[in-house]
Image (cartoon, helix red, strand yellow):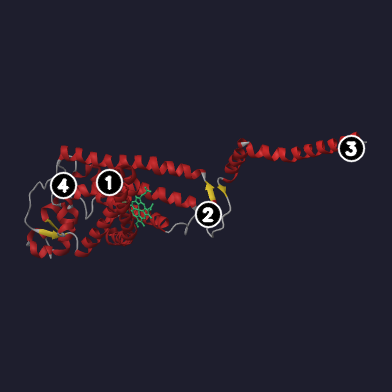
Amino acid sequence: MASFARLIRLTVGAWAFLLVISVAGPSSAQQINPTASSVKEQQLLQELDRIQGRVSIPDQRSGVLEQPAGREWREFRNVTLRWVGGVAILGVLAALVIFYLSRGMVRLEIGRSGRTIVRFTAFERFVHWMTATCFIVLAISGLNITFGRPLLLPLIGFEAFSEWSQWAKYAHNYLSFPFTIGVVLIFLMWIGGNIPNKVDVDWIKRGGGLVGHDHPPAYRFNAGQKAIYWIVVVGGVLVAATGYELMFPFYLSGIEGMQLAQMIHSIVAVLFVAAMLAHIYIGTIGMEGAFEAMGAGTVDVNWAKEHHSLWLEEQNARTGDARSQPAATLAE
Ligand code: HEM
């Protein structure tokens, strides 16, 4: 009898043991099999393009743990952008140095007449310099975001870099407003003289007088200046629209839209900087007498004759012959 009871106890014990193993077995295998869970993660990524959890704070976007497009964006941000920006900016700088060393300053060939003519009003110059000042600060503070960490941080250390970057970021945010107003005013002020026409085709064919000593005719703005005008208007609108999207995150779009805005903003910005370097060159050391136009607001009549002959004719027709009037009246 005793041995029968022992047999029953053994049988029940064996069944209980088997039951425990059959329940615990599969789940413990699932916990320790890393491949099983990563396959699921991979499937999730493929099917949903992201891995998202649930969070208790109101902003549900913070529950996104993995977004493959984010890796591609980071690669663009840390590698492609730096290459495009570096090559564009240093490439234009190198081209300008070579051009200056081989061509030198474009001189006034017939010398100064001693008489001047008004080229830009005080209001036009104010708008130009306000926009230009904002642009330079925006460019330096923006380039600090792109290149500061690898280039500046090792030179000045963490504390100075974070202090400078904070101020640069404030400047980038706040100066965006006068810059945008400036771009709108530039568009309205100078659209009249910047519509492309047949004269521009001839001007381009003759190399704009930059190569050799030719002086192709031009109205108030030549084809090169028109190109700069449209770069400022189109580039300005693009950096402003995408910049405000970045400044007010997630108001207009989700994460993909923010990534696209950053890509457009940064690429347009670095190309914009490269183009403006050429503009600054020709307005300063590249051409004799050009800076006065935006500095004092007047240019020598002979300068106008060489570079904007059709504009000078228009002005003469409107105000009487510039060549026969004293400088003071013309420049008033
Ligand atoms: C209305 C005008 C503009 C606005 C609202 C604006 C706004 C912004 C914002 C919010 C950022 C992101 C900053 C961050 O990551 O913390 C940024 C980055 C940047 N901005 Fe602007 N910006 C404007 C104009 C410009 C201009 C004119 C330039 C250059 C000439 C420029 C160059 C850059 C550059 C290079 C970056 C860094 C891109 C990167 O490496 O991620 N921005 N801007």
Q: How far separated are the C-alphas under marks 2 and 4? A: 52 Å
Q: Secondary structure at mark 1?
A: helix
Would residue 65 be visible to someone looking at this image? yes
Q: Earlier in the sequence, mark 3 or mark 2?
A: 3
Q: How far separated are the C-alphas under marks 4 and 1? A: 32 Å
Q: Read off the residue under disc 2.
A: 61
Q: Quick check: 262 left or right of 167?
A: right
Q: Read off the residue under disc 3.
A: 5
- Mark number, residue 285: 4
Q: Earlier in the sequence, mark 1 or mark 2?
A: 2
Classify 10 Å Cα crowding around label 1: few (below 14), some (14-19), many (20 and above): few
- Mark number, residue 169: none
Mark 3: amino acid:
Ala
Q: How far separated are the C-alphas under marks 3 and 1? A: 85 Å
Look at the image and tell me in which quarter the C terminus lies.
Answer: bottom left
Mark 1: amino acid:
Ile
